[in-house]
Every structure is written in structure tokens, then in C-alpha cells.
Image (cartoon, coloured by chain):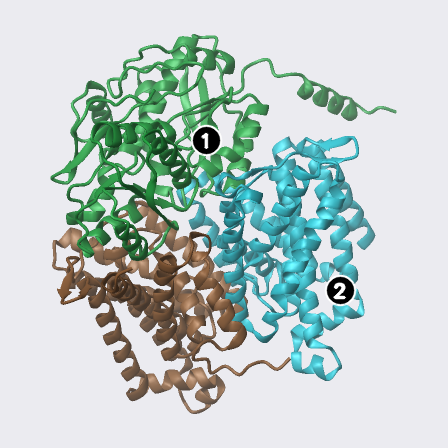
Chain colours: A cyan, B green, C brown
Amino acid sequence: MRHAALATGAAVVVGWPWAAPPYFVFLASLIAINAIVAIGLNLLSGYTNQLSFGHAGFLAIGAYAAAILTIRAPALPVPASLLLAGLATAAVGLALGVPCLRLEGLYLAMATLAFGFVVVEAILNLEWLTRGNDGLHVPAARLGPWAFATDTARYYLVVAVAALLIVAAVNISRTRTGRALLAVRESEIAAQASGVNLAAYRTLAFVVSAFYTGVAGGLFALVVGFLSPDSFDVFLSVDFVAMIIVGGLGSILGSVVGAAVITALNDSLAGFQNYRPLIFGAILVTSMLFMPGGIASALRKIPSIRRLR
Amino acid sequence: MISRASLLLLLAVTLSALPAAAQPGVSDTEIVIGSSNSFSGPLAFTGEQITKFGVDLYFRVVNDAGGIHGRKVRTVYYDDGYRPQDAVANTKKLVEQDKVFAIIIPQGSPPVVATLEYIEENKVPLLFPYQSSPVTRGKRYVLQGMTLSDRSSKMMIDYLAGQRKLKKFAALYQDDEYGKSFLTAFEKDLARFGLKLVAAESVKRGVADVSAQVAKLQAAKPEVTFLVLVPGPGAQALKERQKIGWTDTLMVSTGPLTDERYLSLAAEAAEGVEGLSLWPDPVTSDLPGVKLYREHMQRYFPKNEPNRYSIAGYFAGMLFAEGAKRAGRNLTRESLIASLESVKGFESGILPPITIGPDHETQKQGFWVRVEKGRFKQLTDWLKSE
Amino acid sequence: MTSTALVHVVVSGLATGSIYALMAISLVIIYNATRTLNFAQGEMLMVSTFVGWTALQVLDAPLVVALLVAVAAAALLGFILERVVIRHAISATHFDVLIITLGLSLMLRSAAGVTWTHDEFPFPSFFSNRPLVVGPIRVAPVSLGIIGASLALMLALGALFRWTRLGRAMRAVAQNQRAARLMGISVERVYSSSWVIASVVGAVAGVLIAPVIFLSSKMGLVAINGFTAAVLGGFGSMPGAVVGGMLLGVLENLAPLYLPASIKHSVPFLVMISILIVRPGGVLGRVARRKV
């Protein structure tokens, strides 16, 4: 049953550009990028309870890092620039995570919020590198002789990277590390009593979360093609938080579903203009009222799905 | 064994891969145009005015009179909330899903610039974007809308430094593309007179208090202080000036700010303010085109007050209609661009005669105004920006 | 920078800071009682102020009427939202409620835009904008008025918490909900009251700040500064909210005076991060530092 579901899913993902119009291939790329961020954020907030309102900052770092590498070092193959973007962001994640060890709950949320603002200011100040307010055009990514110049090519790149990162996340969650992270979420005191090094795991969560978001940022730069500080405001960070809460905290499937739902919803409502936030808000309110714990929680209650996990 | 279903599928796929014979967005009965715009976020009010009460107002009139060469114009708008990535997505949607013929009056530099590469690649006309940064110049498929900041700056500095012989200038500017492009332009134009800005302070969008910036500007004792802001902070700056009793500087607003809206927010603090106005007074001007605009607004949207934003959208509609009319019944994207480029001395009854050339700039005008009894009064004729 | 100008800038900062303090207090009141962060606080303030403004336009009444109408609208809005929406999320985690309040904020902002358009409107003030000059000191009455009115409100709230039954009940619930219930305190009543009081405080803040930042659908964004102020001062404590607000307001104003353009906008955030690292509980924090 499970293998059939996975196989169908894989077939849909691989066959999507053949069946769907080009715009929806672009949209699917955006969904996959947001899913990567959501998984990264979930690792931090869903597993170790460190709620972050600054993930747009990590996305920005990864995006600009990848963009600058693509511009300044065009010979660099795209997996390398994505990896470097992820590592650069992870380094910043480490720098942020360590001081944040002493913070909890709201204080941590505010510190991450502040971090998000500071990143955007830094981008504006490093004008010589980022072109500040003028914005940065991102050339097509390259892998050897091939350039990812179409929506479909970029889609496959994004999906390949996303698949890799999802598999990695699933594996992490199954290992000792993953169980330790979950234990931290359930009860920090119990976790510590069982010998879990709280500081190490909380920091690790920050670093891995930043890495994921940084890679997603690199993909974002390549898919959207243009970066500007206006892209990475606090409302984007809040959107990411909404994705993991609507999807379900602590669940990888939830992260993906939450990202898909929020992204697709936002897109489909664009035509409602002034009414868009009204409808979107109403949907958020009703879904949380009727699905406390998010979609993943609600899905878990369906017996046939429960068997899938 | 090839089934009938798969044969049909093959046929469908083959047919859909054939190049479309007709122009996207142009059918026998209608022309479809649209844009990604701000209907939420910091510029939501302007966004709604330029589209629903601007472009759409003009096309209501046109459609009621039978359309352009028998085709009615239909508009499609999507909200991007000033987010560049949403603007990119919306524009793709408009071109690929809604198959619009052209993009009309999108707003804001970051959202517009983000879509430039896509527009040029797909050869879609981007008409009259509502933004003032010169970065959109020099693109085959883009026709400028608002008078660009470097032209505005030239007019303002030529008038103030050249004609009125003022020497000490300062600027209070918004910390974004709009503010920065004017700042750069001012420095360049002042250099022609051997001058420099004596002070420049930046303001973050949405800020609550500008007292520190205004205090610093006052300390530099400028004769003229440029306000490169949006109405809210602009009015705050005027009120702040009143609060500190700083009377010996002339507050001058740039084109996008020069509107009664910012005056009404500043109330009694708006005395003696001057600026460059890009449009005639939409409420009081008796130019024939402006009177017609007011009549149309009264007829179709009586509750909406005339303002410089909706008249900009109305004018954009007018210019599009002119271009489409000249291109004739065989309307294509290329023929539209060509016919717009050929516009010479077009009398709109609103602005001075419009001549568009290969530089694709449709608006190069402005005139000086000064506040009198809560409205901007015209002080000069249309200024030269060449 | 003359000292006259400096005093003016600082007083102006204290005025904006007072508003931040009031915002922070509303957030803290709701948080203390219900352990939820209300993302819609700013939008509720904005809608109440708009309702008060509508009364002004329609009834052509004096400003005081606008204030009363805004307060009444706020109380009603707070009560209804708590009862109809939040109460039903009782089985949800506080993360769920966070998203619910986020949804509400989006709905309120959009509804305001549809009802009143997204335009900005001038709002009359109780206080004059023309400067008051006393020797070398020059201040704007509007700044003093905002500071004074805010302090008065804060004192009134302090009295409420100290000397009334409701106040004591609210403090009990903030300390330990279960124990409070066991003592016979109606926790539901405290929830309702918290939302109503917080909304009313917001409405007063709205009427005070609208003349300065103008009435518009995006006015509610000032609540973000309220969050920052609350954390800066020490979330959970009333005096902390006040100190945090004033500090933030003054910092925001001093930074552009003395610092280069490149970092002046980041200063409030950098300061906040630094304070949180040194004193995780905020300036007046009572929260125990986590020992990791």
C-alpha cells in the first residue's frame, strides 16, 4: 500500500511538466521550495520547539549567496553553488543559534524576528555586493554545458534537490538524532534526564534548519530570477510559520502539505485583489478551528492513512 | 497495440504544440490586458486607484462607445502586495494562463523590474509602469509611464538653482528604489551647477517618527528641502517642521508626492509648500480632457474622488487606446509598439502634446506648484526636461 | 545637535514609546491570561479607531465622542472575537491560536480596506501641533499629551490590577490557572475580561497615535513595535512593557541622530538581541534564565 502510494506520488511529480501548463510547473517549483523551508523550519520549531519568525532572513542569505556565486563564478556547477549557499546560511544559523540557547518561547521568537530585519538591513548596506534596492538579476543556473533556462528544467532541478532533502530529513527523524530531537520537544527535562545534550541538539536543529532554508533560498533565486530586499520581509517569515502550523508541527509530510496548501491558496486568491487577505485569513481561521494540530494531525486520525506512516 | 484513446491523446498533444495563429489577448470581440499590482500592502490605495478607477474608468467609456475597432477591452488584475516574487508569478500567469495582450500600469520598481527579463524574453508589451526609476529604460517592449526621476530632477534643479538661484539643498528620502533614484539624480543635476546636497536623511517606509531626521536636516540649514517620500511620511515631515518651528526652508515635494492627499494629512502644517506637479489639478483644472475625466468619474464611480493616481491610470488607458486605434484592426504586439512609437503631438486635453519616439518615454512633463488654501496652485508653465 | 533639538527628539521618542508601551501592555494582558499571542491586536486597534472616526464624520461630533465610540467598538470587538473564535479553539495548542489570530488580522485589515478603502486619513488630536517654548526647552504639546494620557491609562490599569477583584482574579490566572480555578475564579470570565481590557487599551492608543501616523488600514502595524517593546522590557510584566516601550521609542529616535545611515534602522533590533543575550528576560525580566 505504502509503496503504491509513493510510486504514484513519484510518477505525478516526474510527469507533472508533461501534463500541466507551464505556469503550473513554475508554481510547483515554488511549492517545492517552500516545502524545503517548511521542513527546515519544522525541524527547528516542530521538533525542538524553538519558534522562529526570522526564516525569511535565512532564505535571503541563501538566495543572495547563490545568486552572487552564479554571477561571479559562472563556471561553478549549480549543485556546488546550492551547497555553498546552504553552508553559508548554516554558518549564520550557528552564529544565531548559540546565543539563542538561553532564550525560550516568545523571547526566542522575538530574537529571530529581529534577526530577520537585521539580515534585510545588511543586504541593503552591502550594496556593492547585493546591489541593494536596485535588486539583483540572477542568470540561469548551469551544470556543465547545460543551462537551466526553462521552467521545466528548473522544476526538475528543484524537485531533485527537494527529494534529496526530504529523504535526508526522513532519515534524520528515524535515527537517534531524530528521536533525540523529538524527545526534546516532548519534554526537555525528561530528555535531559535521558542523557540528551540539550544544547547540542538545539544548536544542531538551528544549523540544519538554516542549511535547508539556505538551499531553498538558492533555488528561490534561480527560479524567480530576481532578488530584492522587498522579497524577504517579516510577512514571508510569518507565511512559513503558517505553513508548518497548518501542515502540522513535527511532521515532514505536514511540512510538505502545509507548504503546498498555503502556496497554492495564495496563488489562487491573487485574482480577488482586495479580498485576498480576507478570504485567506478566513480559511486560516476555519482550518485551525476544525483541524487543531494541523493537517497532519487530522490525517493521522484517518485509519487508512495511519497505516501509511 | 495503439488504443484509440492514446491516438486521440497524441493528436491533442500535437495540436497544442502547434504555434498559436492568433495574437494572444486579441479576439474578434475583445482585447484582454492586465497587470500585477498592489491591492494589499503599502501601496494598496494607489494600486486600486490606477487600475479600477483609472484604466478601467477609461475603458468603460471606450467600451460603451463600441470599443476599439469593434473590440471591447477587458482587464485582469492580480494582487502582488508589492512583493517582487509575487509580481513575477502573477505576470507569468497573466501571459501564460490569461493570455493577455499586454501588461498595463503595474506599480513599483521592485515588482516591475523583477518581471523585465520575462517580458523581454516573451515579447510582451509592458505599458506605462507606475514607477519613476530610470532602470526600466532601454527595453524594446517597455514604454515608460510616469515622468522618470532623472527628468523630474532636471526640471526641479534647473528651476530652483537655475531660475531662482537657490544654493543650499537637502533631501529627506525614502529608503528604497524611489528615494535612492531621486537622490542620485539630484546629486548629478546639482553638480552641473557646481553644487552638492548639504544633507540627506533616509526614512524607512512605515516609520512613525521623523523628528531625528528633520532635526539633522535643520542643523544643515538648507534653503530647500526635497521630500522624496509617500504621503504619510511626507505629511509627518511637514508636521515635524511645524513642531520645531523651522520656517526658513522651502519644502519641495517630488512628482509622486505632489498631491492634495499629502496636504490634507498635514492640515495646517502645509503652508508655503511647493513641488513639481506631474498632472494638472484633477479637481479644479478646466483643461478639456480633465473635465471629461471628472465627468466620467462622476458617471461611473460617483463616490470616488478624482485624484492624480486615477487620472494617471485613465491616461494610460487613453494612450493604449490611441496606440491600438492607430494599429488598426490587425492588432499585434509588434504593431502596437510601432504605432505607439509613431505618436506625434497627441492631444489628450490633459497633458501637453505627447510625442513618443524610440526612447519610449511617454511623459516628460511637469510644472511648478505652490500651496494656496489647501490646494496646489500652478506657478509656471510646463517645464522643459530635455 | 543643539540641546533644544535633542530634548525635542527625545520627548518625541517618549511619545511614540508610550504608544508602544500601551500596545505592549495589551499584548501582555492577553498573554498573561490566556497564554496566547494576539497577532490581531494592531488590526483590532485600527478597526476601533476607524469606527470612532466614522462617528466623527457621520455625527459631526466632538473628538471625545470619537474616543468613546472607539472604546465601545473595541470592547465589543474584543468580546466577540474572544467568545466566538478564540474560546472555540480551546482544544487547540497555543500555536494553533497563533495562526487563528494571524488569520483574524488579515481579515480585519482587508475588511477595513473594503469598508474605508486603503487611503490614509487625517485624524484630529486633543493636543496642538504648535510648539510650546519654555526657555531653552521646546516641546510639542502633542507629544506631552500622548505621554500624559498613556501614563494616566497605565496608572488606571495598575490600580485595576491591584485593588479590584477582577484585577486580582486576572493576576491569579496569570500565575497559575489551575489553582485559580480551584479557588473558584471563573477563568472564562478572566479570558473575556482580558480581551476586552486589552482591546480598550488598544483603542485609546489608536486615538492617541492616529493624528501622528494617520488613520489607515496599515495603522495596525505599530503592533509589531509593541511586541518588540514587550520583549525588550520583559514580557509578562506590566512595568516591563512600559520600560520597553519608552526605551524602544527613544532608541529609534536617537539612532538616526548619531549613527550612520547604514545601521540606524537596525539599531533597535540589534539592541534587543544584545539585551536578550545578556538578560534573556528582558530589561526588567522576571523570567528565570534557562540553564542549558
**Tag 1's secondary structure?**
strand
Asked whether B122 or C95 is in front, the reply is: B122
Figure check: C178 above or below B369: below
* Dot label at residue B124: none
Name the residue tied to disc 2.
A173
* Three-letter amino acid code of the residue under disc 2: Ser
Residue placed most toward the observer, C22 or B229: B229
- Whether residue A303 is visible, yes or no, is yes
Position of the N terminus of chain B, as image quadrant, is top right
Chain of the residue under label 2: A
x, y percent for residue A21? 64, 31
**Residue B127 image point, x, y percent:** 43, 24
Residue with the mark numbered 1: B35
Q: Same chain, marks 1 and 2?
A: no
Residue kind at label 1, given as amino acid type: Ser
Task: Tell me where residue A179 appears, x and y as whole percent.
Answer: 75, 71
Horizontal side, residue B361 vs residue A153: left or right? left
